[in-house]
Structures are given as structure tokens and as C-alpha cells.
Image: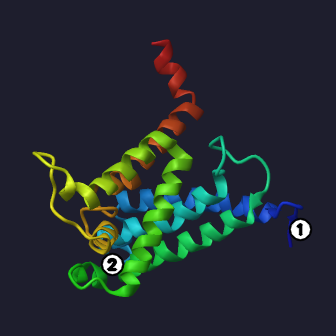
Amino acid sequence: MSKIEISEDGQIGSPFLNNIITVLAVSLTFGSIAWAADLLRAVGLVIYSEQYIGGMLTIALPLVYLAVPAGPGRHRQGPVPWYDIGFAIIGLLVAAFTAVRFPELTELVTLRPLDGMISGAVMMVLLIEGLRRCVGNTLTFVVIFFLAFALLGHLIPGVLQGRPVTFEKLVYYSAWDSSAILGIPMRIVTTIVVAFVLFGNLLFRSGGAAFFTDI
């Protein structure tokens, strides 16, 4: 077994965690390829595309919190803090719950059951923090601004005035509707973007990039 070292500030360093990060990164890539090549259907697994996205988030959320630090920089240098390990586990559980329960809970937008509300709220918080770590503050503030606008837009006079939206409705709709978190943008990211980055790196590693540059 690998040795786990705990520093005085509560950070955990272990080759085992590094192996988990590698496995998650590889699994994310293979998951995208499997969906693009329709391998899931070939083995008899028929699921909604939103369930596939939930499955990819089950891989991506732990990967973000284990590999990307909360502070400056997009690549972790040193051990993983205990709270990031906790966030990674929570993200895995919530995303897996989303993938499994999507067919039932997406039909209950008007009823908004408690388990859907709690998991949806946790999912939103983890995604916003993950966005901040990976992209930075600018896009994160844009997302938060429009979430606030959805809640307070009915108080704005004039042509920008929106409909009244309760916090519960916003959270549940964002998490469980097929046009929100699990909608087209995330579908593009988990299919086209991942495949594009993969084959771009294959081209670079094989020397193809230099060939086209020379031309």
C-alpha cells in the first residue's frame, strides 16, 4: 500500500491520490470516445444524454478538486488539502446521484422534491467553484450575476424586467432540466471539446503539428 503523509496544515500527500487523478483523467477521455463511437449502445446500455453528462460530471468534479488548487494556479503543486478531498467525494456522489435519478426527478420540476433540491444546490455550488478554479473570476462573476438576475429581475423596471422566480425553482430547474446544467453546452464540452483536445494532443505528440507548421 502507498504511504499517506499528513502535514501539519492538514494536507494529504499520497501516490495513491496521484494515481486516482490519472485514472479520472483517462476515464474522462475514454468516456467521451465511448459516447461518440456509440459504444454504450453497442453493449446494450441505453441511457439519456443527460445521464451520460451526469456520468461525465461524476468523473470531472472529483478530478477538478483533486488536481486544481483553490488558490493561484491551475495545476496543483504539493499535497491535496483534506477539504478538497471532501469536496471531490461529495462531487462524485452528487453527480452519480444525478446520473441515476435523472429520468425520475426531471419530471418533477413543479413538485421539487427535497432530494432533488439538495443535490441540485450542492451541484450548482461545486460547479461554480470548479469554474472559478479552472477559468478564473471573470466568467464566475458572469454566472453569479445572471443567477442573481434571475432571482431579482422582476424588481428591475423597464424592458429588462423579468418574471418572478423563486430560489427553489431556480435551483431545481438549473440542476434537473435538460436545457440547464445538463443541456447542450455541457453536451458539447463532454463530446466535441474533449475529443478535439485529445486528437489535437495526438497530432502534437506524433509530430503532425510541426509538419503543418513547416508547410
Which residue does the numbered mark 1 point to in the structure image?
A: 3
User: In the image, what residue type sits under mark 1?
Assistant: Lys
Residue 89: percent from the left, percent from the top?
Answer: 61, 72
Q: Is residue 53 left or right of residue 165?
A: right
Location of residue 161 with respect to 163 vertically, above or below: above
In the image, 15 versus 213, the foreground residue is 15
Q: Residue at x 16, y 56 (%)?
A: 162
The quarter of the picture where the C terminus appears is: top left
Q: What is the distance, in whole Å, between disc 1 and disc 2 at their CAs?
A: 39 Å
* Residue at the outermost top position: 215
Residue at disc 2, secondary structure: helix
The quarter of the picture where the N terminus appears is: bottom right
Residue 191 can be seen, yes or no = yes
Q: Quadrant of residue 174?
A: bottom left
Residue at disc 1, secondary structure: loop
Q: Residue at x 77, y 65 (%)?
A: 16
- Mark positioned earlier in the residue sequence (1 or 2): 1
Q: Quadrant of residue 88?
A: bottom right
Residue 29 can be seen, yes or no = no
Which residue does the numbered mark 2 point to in the structure image?
A: 102
In the image, 131 versus 199, the foreground residue is 131
Mark 2, Cα crowd under 10 Å, few <14 / some 14-19 / many 20+, is many
Snapshot colouring: rainbow
In the image, 45 versus 71, the foreground residue is 71
User: In the image, what residue type sits under mark 2?
Assistant: Phe
Residue 102: percent from the left, percent from the top?
Answer: 33, 78
Q: Is residue 135 left or right of residue 89?
A: left
